[in-house]
């Protein structure tokens, strides 16, 4: 299920767009709140399939991707992103095994994608902001 939420705030990165996908609503909402405080328009997808639909429509500047999800997981999304016309920096997160995010990062780099960060849950707001700040033009204040 998707929330279809599109939220933004005035401030640090006007016009920047972030798409987060996580099957845990509280985590997706946390990422959205942190990004919105920095002025980033944020969309939340709850499934991999919804992420694909929103990605095509939104053309985000940054994606935050949970690795372990039902149906389409983060690894499958990396494969899919590797053949898309639009690309953006990726931040991988997991609350499971740390090697999952390292494997996803390796897979993404092999596909020619940019990995801006790998984070383990629970994560701090500062760690997420630092990862987003590593995305170049999408820097936050």
Image: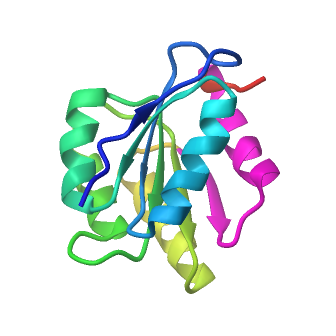
Q: How is the image coloured?
A: rainbow
Q: Quadrant of the N terminus?
A: bottom left
> On the picture, is 8 further left or further right than 128?
left
The stretch drawn in magenta includes residue 126: yes
The stretch drawn in magenta includes residue 97: no
Q: Quadrant of residue 88?
A: top left
Instruction: Please give the range of residues in magenta.
Output: 115-137
Residue located 26% across and 66% down the image: 76
Q: How far across and how far down the image is residue 40, in percent?
A: 56, 26
Q: Quadrant of the C terminus?
A: top right
> On the picture, is 99 further left or further right than 53?
right
> In the figure, 92 relative to 112: above or below?
below
> On the picture, is 38 further left or further right than 138?
right
Residue located 28% across and 50% down the image: 51
> On the picture, is 22 further left or further right than 40?
left
> In the figure, 41 relative to 45: above or below?
above
Q: How far across and how far down the image is residue 89, in percent?
A: 50, 39
Residue located 55% across and 62% down the image: 27
> In the figure, 109 relative to 137: above or below?
below
Q: How far across and how far down the image is residue 46, in percent?
A: 33, 60
Q: How far across and how far down the image is residue 3, in percent?
A: 32, 49
> In the figure, 124 relative to 64: above or below?
below
Residue located 50% across and 43% down the image: 114
**Count of numbered tags:** 0
């Amino acid at each position: 299920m998707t929330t279809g939420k599109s939220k933004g705030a005035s401030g640090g990165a006007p016009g920047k767009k972030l798409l987060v996908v996580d099957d845990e609503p509280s985590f997706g909402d946390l990422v959205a709140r942190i990004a919105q405080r920095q002025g980033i328009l944020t969309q939340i997808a709850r499934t991999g399939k919804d992420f694909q639909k929103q990605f095509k429509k939104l053309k985000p500047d940054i994606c935050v991707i949970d690795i372990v999800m039902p149906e389409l997981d983060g690894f499958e999304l990396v494969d899919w992103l590797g053949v898309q016309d639009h690309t953006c920096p990726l931040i991988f997160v997991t609350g499971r095994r740390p090697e999952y995010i390292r494997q996803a990062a390796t897979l993404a780099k092999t596909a020619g994608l940019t990995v801006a960060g790998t984070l383990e849950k629970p994560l701090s707001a500062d760690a997420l902001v630092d990862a987003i700040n590593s995305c170049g033009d999408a820097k936050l204040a």
